[in-house]
Image: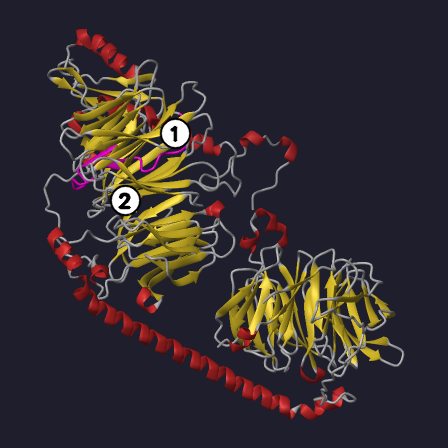
Amino acid sequence: MPEAREYASMRLEDVVLPPEDDMGIPSEDEDDDIEEIQSETGFGSVIVVDNLPVVPPGKHEKLVTVVRKIYGQIGTIREGGLWMPVDQATKNTKGYAFVEFCSAQEADAAMAQTDGYKLDKSHVFKVNKFDEFDKFIKVPDAYTAPAVKDYNAKANLWSWMMDERGRDQFAIRFGDDTELYWNDPARRCSEEVYRRSFWTESYVQWSPMGSMLTTVHRQGVAVWGGVGWQRLARFDHPGVQLVDFSPCEKYLITASTQEPSNPRDSATVLVKMFNVRAGQVARVFEGPLSDFVHEGVSGLPWPLFKWAGGCDDKYFARMSKNQISVYSTPDMALLDKKSVKVEGVADFNWCPTAPILSIYQPETGNQPARISLLQIPSRIELRQKNLFSVSEVKMYWQSEGEYLAVRVDKYTKTKKSTYSGFELFRVKERECPMEVLELESKTDKIVAVSWEPNGTRFAIIHGDGHRPDLTFYTMSNKQGRVGKVGTLKGKSVNALYWSPTGKNIVLAGLKSMNGQLEFFNVDEFEVLASAEHFMCTDVDWDPTGRYCVTSVSSQHQMENGFNVWSFNGKLLYKLSRDRFFQFLWRPRLPSLLSEEQEADIVKNLRTYSKKYEVQDDELAKEQNQTNQAGRQALLDEYRAWQREAHAILESQREEREALIGHIPEEEDVDMEEVDIEEIIDITEEIISM
Amino acid sequence: MRPILAKGHERPLTYIKFNREGDIFFSCAKDHHPTLWYTDSGERIGTYLGHNGAVWSCDVTRDTRRLITASADTTFKLWDVQSGKELYSLDFEGPARYTCFSTGEQMCLLTTDAFMGHESCIRIMEMNWEDDSMRRVQDIYGHQGRITRAVWGPLNKTIISTGEDRTIRQWDVETGKELMCIEDAHKKTIQDLEVSLDGTQFITGSLDRTAKLWDIFTLEEKKCYTTERPLNAVAISPLLDHILVGGGQDAAAVTTSSAQAGGFEAMFIHKIYEEYLGGVKGHFGPINALAISPDGRSFVSGGEDGFIRVHHFDADYFQMK
């Protein structure tokens, strides 16, 4: 027990709590103290500059001035924070210096900017953080070879492609669950492959070739695959929001935007590029949001990096102010160490099958708007076109990269309204010839443009109001030029979905148009079927173009779920799921068949299809039998229950009749049909013959 | 099938009840006047004037002589069906919600909502048909929140009730004690309960978008019917193995979408296979009340839109497999 003291004679300042024990009373200024001590003793803001010239005492002052000047530009050097040690014996400097900044951020910046700085030919700065020296000291002097890890066979990621009946898989996400299914149209149902609750914290995404499913978590991104859906790799990126793959799924790109703690600061963006197979970071891009977004755009554009097509993930590019930066893999470095200068660039796209960039620069002052095609890596301009009084330009590549359609909205002479036309580039032909296409009624607004995959046609929705027109054009009419195929007038359609194999297209009136669907064959120019999936929000063709799925996602409160249709608009089956978020077909690998082999199959389709027709019939029969059996079982069960229930009822009959008492249980009612004839009026009339 | 539109109420419908023969039916609505109709023609026979609040439900005697109604004006009233005369009125502390005669009609149960400190309650009354009055026998307390439905079990020995608390409870009529409570019978408020005509099963419908079929003796869940809309009303066909469910998007949210989005059709579902059979569109607000005639050849729906739609099935409905 401490002895008692008189309160009045005690000075509060003298009260000292035992060290390491605050008696459970946190002190208000304690936290501040700790922070300050750390910054003073932690050396987080100290850098060590090596490879300085060794100078005699007379030149000390001059060298210090030079170093101070270099680092004074980057950050504020703490008072007395620059120290250059001197050799006691020779009185010369030792060739290195310590610089302490006011903050660790400044030190980081100084290190990044001056590491490798050439003071002169023989003195190239080598800059390290003071804290890192500890780490370097710990490196053992003797080399020990790293242990060779055992070879772990990776799961077969392509097993789903081996399905005997050539079915496709899809993933759905609803509520907290993610489920994977086989689409089994022959049996009019879907077969579950895998399901898991809370698999992802925001969404799932297939890799572009379908081998992996990506889940997004607070800590980063994970990819899953193989028969058992085991985790293949984890990619660390706290707070990740956006995910993208390179087309051959060699690289994974993740991005997050960090809102600043101080609203006056800019939000910072962190983009990580991972090598998917190695699971390692290939490159990191970091900086304030303003470095990544174009003026007047809010939020990070995604995909931030666009990948060149048809060249095995060799090039990727992003647009920033007045330039397009093209990077090459695997070193992830800027191609030829410099960006492509493009004054005022507003949009760019890659050709889907070749490393060709299409670039749009808007009109500025008396400079016309410009569309150009640039070959990478040679940076040769293949074609360019100048345009005047342009309000907006949109570029659409055909899937094989043969054609580029550029939609141009121009101002009318009064500058009050705009009208649209197309500039069409034949990219694969010599000299890249170009054609101009004008709409028949110039004032029509263009709602949507869509190329036929692997084809020469494109469809546009044009017109105003609830029933716009739909026109198909082809790039090769009889004269080998652009021509109209046909127009469908007054369709309630606002979105176009071509089958991935071309020929068929779904004309959809989504959302405000209540989910009107029309399955259209463009070859025959006829409607295959009209249908409706009420309030439908999405349409997705399976990768083979045989089936089409329409879904209602949770932006609507009710009737969430999806319908599966055949390509010709026959409803095959439906599945409803509350709080439905995503429907994703698993992409397929490109076909291994050569063009001749494919042509052969088309030619002999009858002989090939026979086998499958028989199979389908059998399956349908089998399914029918199982359904029948299931129904019979249900019926038997119900009847057994009802027999029991009626037995109880019968046993209670007397009691019940007693309750009802005066009213007999089964009243016999005599029904009698009575014909009543009533003469209302009789009038006599003499008819003259 | 051509429906007959019966427009006699100015406010949303709340309840529809056929008499035993099914030749006439009674409708209750939030306007204050229960109404009597011919089933065949949809012609209005008359109204029962006297209530001073929304009428929530009603029941009619086997001989179609007496009608009892429950109203938000806190009263239950007994009426002479033919003359429309008010014979007896009983006042409580809270709004009257549901009422139902026992087998044999010697007793009657009434439910009242929780109000101003009074708990929601099931009240068992004894009928005195000599002078058309009632005597209080037993009060049963126990449900959390509103009691939506309460019906007599086999031989009037038990009472089965449902409520906002998502439970189905079984009570002993003699003692008023709770015999059984099925917690989480549904995931949301149970809106409707109807006993089949043969008295072996009953069906419940809930805002959780499902309807369930139960064994009335064991209170075992036998079937579950999932739909995409909140359900307000359910009915069992006495003729075919079909059930009829209706409901739709909450009335407060209706104006935000088109009529079709609300799911305001009456849906037929196969009772045994739990398969969707078809729907009858027409209402432009949620369906609040459904009733199938005792012969199973007609049904009547009442909506938030204030319309009653009387449907007589076509011949092909009965040929349906």
Assess disc 2: are there few (<14), some (14-19) or many (≥20) residues with their C-alpha within 10 Å of its C-alpha.
many
Q: Range of the magenta residues?
A: A296-317
Residue B237 occupies which quadrant of the picture? bottom right
Would you say residue A251 is visible in this rendering? yes
The kind of residue tagged 1 is Lys
Residue A457 occupies which quadrant of the picture? top left
Vertical placement of residue B48 versus A637, above or below = above
Q: Residue A537 vs residue A363: left or right?
A: right
Q: Secondary structure at mark 2?
A: loop
Task: Give whichever of discs 1 and 2 has the lower sequence position.
Answer: 1
The kind of residue tagged 2 is Glu
Same chain, labels 1 and 2? yes
Residue projecting furthest to the top? A58
Residue projecting furthest to the front? A689
Q: Secondary structure at mark 1?
A: loop
Pointer 1 residue:
A442
Q: Residue A304's spot in the image, x, y percent? A: 31, 35
Q: Name the residue: 64% across, 92% down.
A: A651
Give the camera-side residue of B265 and A610. A610
Residue A621 tag number: none
Q: Residue A188 vs residue A328: left or right?
A: right
Give the camera-side residue of A130 and A602. A602
Q: Residue A105 vs residue B134: left or right?
A: left
Q: Quadrant location of the C terminus of chain A?
A: bottom right
Q: Is residue A316 magenta?
A: yes
Q: Residue A122's spot in the image, x, y percent? A: 10, 17
Pointer 2 residue:
A452
Vertical placement of residue A452 versus A56, above or below = below
Q: Residue B152's spot in the image, x, y percent? A: 70, 78
